[in-house]
Image (spheres, rainbow, N blue to C red):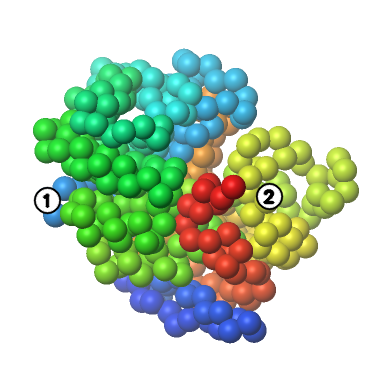
Amino acid sequence: MSSTLISTPLIYIRSCTSVTSSGRKWAAPARCCTAATPSAAEVKENRRELLKSGEDELEICRVLNGMWQTSGGWGRIDRNNAVQAMIDYADAGLSTFDMADHYGPAEDLYGIFINRVRRERPPELQETVRGLTKWVPPPVKMTRSFVSESIDVSRRRMDVASLDMLQFHWWDYSNPGYLDALKHLTDLKGEGKIKTIALTNFDTERLRIILENGIPVVSNQVQHSIVDMRPQQKMAELCQLTGVKLITYGTVMGGLLSEKFLDTNLTIPFAGPPLNTPSLQKYKRMVDAWGGWSLFQELLRTLKNVANKHGVSIPTVSVRYILDQPAVAGSMIGVRLGLSQHIKDANAVFSLVLDEEDISSILQVTNKGKDLQKIIGDCGDEYRRA
């Protein structure tokens, strides 16, 4: 397994807030008190993060491999090539995979992958591999048998006795059945079928209710990027008070935060790269709500200057910036298994240190954007609007 290019270094301090012309406050991310390049030992020591609630704990890689792209819309997935790509990511130290029961064959691919790891790799690598899945149930009565049978399906598909993490999503807050489901999941955790319980796309108010009901939540997965800073307004404060961590997705906005879209004009038909995946289309709508393509181009130019300064890419800077935010344990980068790979960019995140000049230049642009909390609502609300 590669021992190079891993996570965040040195001692961090929180910087003061920056105030926009509209009076909104945006917190700059934690930053290193020195711009010195981290040593290999410091990089390796800090590549992983421990998620914890009471006696429940799970260590993950801080850059996660997101498998939404296996659900269709990103190109045909060849099973053998996809599993080999998962092996390649794990061999490179990127050994945490995020999936869901509804991400096409994602759980089945993980099952094949983990069996290859068991057969072909040393126990030391297997011990670092994590499979995080999600359960998104229909709005039916959450009985103990229904919850248990649903979880057993994921256990069989992933070929594991105990799920490393079960991330729970619920569509309709007006239906309090989510608390029943979470209590059954807690019981299943006690039986050893689940190691840790987490959430995905829950807002701050419901997270507070869930914690008040004694559910041992270790993390909440939310959309979070340089453009979408909503989690830092309310959610991060509650997380810091309770110990719940954030796992972020949409951090490179489906690829919009990359050199590919720098100096492009999407307002002219066929003038720029096509928005030909569900994620690109989704995050283009976020750009439109935040400030439009012209402001986004200003952001990309700023990120490119920072990237050039450090010898990395725009996606690498974008992920590092979010990993340095309060309460963030890990950030996801989507993987198109067997079609393309970004191992080099992902591993570069772990040795990158953004200095005060970098952060200031980024804030000068992002402070011009609109407050998405006011436009869209709290974390996850974009999925619950009519």
Q: Residue at x 25, y 36 (%)?
A: 164
In x, y percent, where is residue 307? 60, 60
Amino acid type indicated by mark 1: Glu
**Mark 1 Cα shell of 10 Å, populated few (<14), some (14-19), many (≥20):** few
Q: Residue at x 41, y 57 (%)?
A: 203
- Left or right of 120? Residue 97 is right
Label 2 sits on residue: 284
- Number of the label disc, if any, that sits on residue 310: none
Q: Nearer the viewer, residue 41 or 47?
A: 47
Give the quarter of the figure containing the N terminus: top left
Q: How far apart, in angstroms, are the residues tagged by discs 2 and 1?
A: 41 Å
Q: Residue at x 54, y 32 (%)?
A: 69
Q: For numbered disc 1, what is the local secondary structure?
A: loop
Amino acid type indicated by mark 2: Lys
In the rendered image of this protein, does residue 263 appear above or below residue 180?
Answer: below
| N-term mark: 2 or 1 | 1
In the rendered image of this protein, does residue 193 appear above or below residue 345?
Answer: above
- The image shows a total of numbered marks equal to 2
Label 1 sits on residue: 55
In x, y percent, where is residue 294? 77, 62
Q: Quadrant of residue 151?
A: top left
